Amino acid sequence: MTAPAKPHVFDATTERFQEEVLQKSLQVPVLIDFWAEWCQPCKTLGPILEKLAADYNGAFELAKVDVEAEQQLGAAFQIRSIPTVFLVKDGQLVDGFAEALPESAVREFLKHHGIEPAAPAVEEEAPVEAPPVDLHAEVVRLRHEVAEHPDKSELKLDLALALLATGAATESEQLLDALPANLATDDRTLRARSRLNFLAVTRDAPPVETLEATIAAQPDDLQARYLLGARQIAAGRDEAGLEQFIELLRRDRAYQDGLPRKALIDAFRVVADEDLIGRYRRKMASLLF
């Protein structure tokens, strides 16, 4: 059923399931389609899922599991009927369905989990390096824009981000809190929220030197590790902060209801270095799975 060249569709195997599905789901949601050649409803649902994988242009990946060829995976997921579809995000199984839904229902299922079609990639010309931005001047400019166009929420988001960049966290957070629902889930808003979370955590935290001394004397002081990681991320020392969160995950993944994993995911939203994020996503996956 699965043509080899179909975009964002692949055959999942037992041997490579951790790498191809679980680790991949840390970067992009993965839909797992359990099917078999003899299954008639699968022949209805399968092409719909493959079409949507192409239409959504990488917003999710479709992993096809032939239950006849991959019986261990079928047993691991306790598959009792096919087709059965599961959604995996951030390494966790979050939802699923066990019937041949129509395309509209599958789209609604994806939308319910925040998965929307991605814009097609376009070739970009070599970027022209822009002059450095005067952040305080940008705040002044945006304040005037917001005053002139009070109904344009996009401008308020731009102002909130500019204020956060200058350290005006309180005013930035107030603007973010007042955004409409469509902007409250914008990637830029989520990234700003994560940075604000780290700033809030570190507001009353001891200085870096004190936290480092505490950890040197008591390596299992997990709260000190978390605060040190948050301080490092807030200060722009990304790798040092990620290393503390990874060590926190290594020592106790269940600490404070999964705080190590949450801290890493928040940090991935804040850090701009994609290579660094990739390295630490792999470290995180190796510890979780």
Image: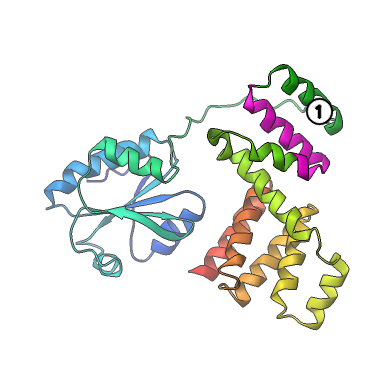
Closer-to-camera residue (65/169): 169
Residue at 71%, 72% in the rendered image: 223
Closer-to-camera residue (55/265): 265
Residue at 64%, 40% in the rendered image: 177
Q: Name the secondary structure under disc 1.
A: helix
| Main SS of residues in magenta | helix
Asked if residue 266 lies left or right of residue 128, the reply is left
Asked if residue 232 lies left or right of residue 63, the reply is right
Asked if residue 89 lies left or right of residue 127, the reply is left
Q: Position of residue 7 (x, y in %)?
A: 37, 39
Asked if residue 132 lies left or right of residue 283, the reply is right
Q: Which residues are magenta?
A: 151-171
Q: Is residue 37 visible?
A: yes
Q: Position of residue 171 (x, y in %)?
A: 76, 39
Residue at 73%, 16% in the rendered image: 148
Q: Residues within 10 Å of mark 1 (few under 14, many from 20)?
A: some
Q: Position of residue 259 (x, y in %)?
A: 60, 66
Instruction: Give residue 246's quadrant in the image.
Output: bottom right
Residue holding disc 1: 138
Give the residue at the far top of this rendering: 148
